[in-house]
Amino acid sequence: MGKVAIVCNGSENSSVYPTFIMGSAAAATGDDVIIFFTPGSVPALMPGYLENLKAKGMPSMNELLEGVKALGGRMVLCELALEAKDVTPADLRDDLEIGGATSFIVDIKDAKTTFSF
Amino acid sequence: MATHTIDALGLKCPQPILKIAVKAKELQQGDMLEVLADCPSFPVDIKAWCERTGKTLLFCATDGEGKHKAQIQF
């Protein structure tokens, strides 16, 4: 069906929750979902962080994450984050791709819906 | 044809629909899916999901306590 591109700019709940709520809702309705994480989101991409994230009144982050993945959603971390935040891919969750802005822009050329949180 | 059930009681939007979408991958055409949910937006969401994905929403009924029961024909 369609394609939805989401940029996640931070590691606070106000960035991470809408990213995965919109992402999982889009994936559930049959859209291809690609989430691009900018360097500010790195703290949320440490192994286990999302799995254990809870917030009052909000759905289980772990289930949103598993749903996005089960429905083929892609998660890409901006390659600039590695040097900017002094991390290596091995420090981060293992379901991330590392990618650049150019390939993201090419990938989302046909996305009719975009979000930035 | 088989009948499947999802208990999504207590789950918040968009988790019930997400569970249905993940389950849908293993269902065959003609299968029946029954879903229980108490998320307030469920009746509207399930209607939208069925329209978008080409499934038939046979009914979505709500009892006096805000519990919804939907039946979807795949």
Image (cartoon, grey):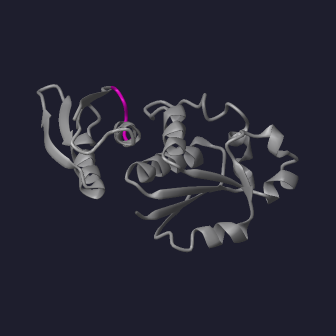
Q: Is residue A4 left or right of residue A45?
A: left
Residue at horizontal 23%, vertical 38%?
Answer: B31
The quarter of the picture where the C terminus of chain A appears is bottom right
Q: Determine the main secondary structure of the stretch shown in magenta.
A: loop
Q: Quadrant of residue B54?
A: bottom left
Q: Quadrant of residue A16?
A: top right
Does residue A8 show up? Answer: no
Q: Is residue A18 left or right of residue B8?
A: right
Total number of numbered discs in the rendering? 0
Q: Position of residue A110 (x, y in %)?
A: 51, 73
Residue at horizontal 50%, vertical 69%?
Answer: A111
Q: Is residue A110 magenta?
A: no
Which residue ends up furthest to the front in the rendered image?
A: B1
Q: Position of residue A53 (x, y in %)?
A: 59, 31
Residue at horizontal 71%, vertical 67%?
Answer: A101
Does residue A75 show up? Answer: yes
The quarter of the picture where the N terminus of chain A appears is bottom left
The boundaries of the magenta stretch are B10-14
Residue at horizontal 38%, vertical 36%?
Answer: B19
Q: Is residue A31 left or right of residue A38?
A: left
Q: Position of residue A40 (x, y in %)?
A: 72, 51
Of residue A46 and residue A116, the one placed in the foreground of this image is A46
